[in-house]
């Protein structure tokens, strides 16, 4: 389960809309309370290093910077997000082949420049199984 605020969802959607027609990407910082329960603390947008509209790539320096920021705030990177311009908020073949099992993934569907759905996924060991996670909205932090 993902626990997050309406503001977190708004930040994800706004970044996706601003990046359209390209893909946006970024990190989700927070706490992993157990194997299936994450509490979101902060959304950290980063630039997409790919120039094409259908893929994203995160600069390794952004990984390091966000790890430091998370540690300074007593959090960790718990998720990675990206958008699917003019496509569904479901896992693509590329998502399935490149995902890391220690993070959850948020995918934002954007159609004609408007974000309309955010889905969260968790990968099992060796990426053999994926689970669509449930969102639980909390009051503003």
Image (spheres, rainbow, N blue to C red):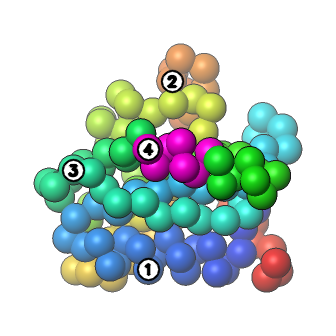
- N-terminal of the pair, mark 3 or mark 2, is 3
Name the residue tied to disc 1: 14
Place of residue 45 in the rendered image (x, y in percent of width and height, measured from the top left): 47, 64
Between 126 and 71, the one nearer to me in the picture: 71
In the rendered image, which residue does mark 4 sit on?
61
Q: Is residue 65 magenta?
A: yes
- Image-based side of 94 in relation to 64, left or right: left
Q: Quadrant of residue 95?
A: top left
Residue 127, which numbered label?
Answer: 2
Q: Residue, x 79% and y 82% (percent of image)?
A: 140
- The residue positioned 21% from the left and 50% from the top of the image is 50
Task: Give the quarter of the image for residue 112.
Answer: bottom left
Residue most toward the left? Answer: 52
Q: Which residue is mark 3?
A: 50
Looking at the image, is 8 positioned above or below residue 2?
below
User: Which structural element holds mark 2?
Assistant: helix
Characterize the local packing of mark 3: few (<14), some (14-19) or many (20 or more) Cα atoms within 10 angstroms. some
| Left or right for 124, reference 137 | left
Picture layout, residue 60 above or below residue 72: above
Residues in magenta?
A: 61-67
Q: Is residue 85 left or right of residue 121?
A: left
Q: Label 4: few (<14), some or many (≥20) within 10 Å?
A: few
In which quadrant of the rendered image does the C terminus lie?
Answer: bottom right
Structural distance between the alpha carbons of marks 3 and 4: 15 Å
Total numbered badges shown on the rendered structure: 4
Q: x%, y% of residue 122?
A: 59, 40
For the residues marked 2 and 4, what is the alpha-carbon distance in whole angstroms?
26 Å
């Amino acid at each position: 389960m993902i626990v997050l605020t309406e503001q977190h969802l708004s930040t994800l959607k706004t970044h996706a809309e601003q990046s359209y027609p390209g893909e946006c990407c970024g990190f989700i910082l927070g706490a992993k309370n157990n194997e299936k329960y994450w509490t979101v603390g902060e959304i950290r947008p980063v630039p997409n290093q790919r120039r094409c509209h259908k893929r994203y790539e995160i600069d390794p320096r952004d990984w390091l910077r966000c790890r430091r920021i998370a540690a300074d705030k007593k959090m960790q990177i718990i998720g990675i997000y990206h958008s699917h311009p003019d496509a569904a908020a479901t896992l693509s073949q590329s998502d399935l082949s490149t995902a890391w099992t220690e993070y959850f993934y948020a995918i934002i569907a954007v159609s004609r420049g408007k974000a309309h759905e955010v889905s969260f996924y968790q990968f099992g060991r060796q990426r053999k199984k994926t689970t669509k996670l449930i969102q639980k909205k909390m009051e503003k932090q």
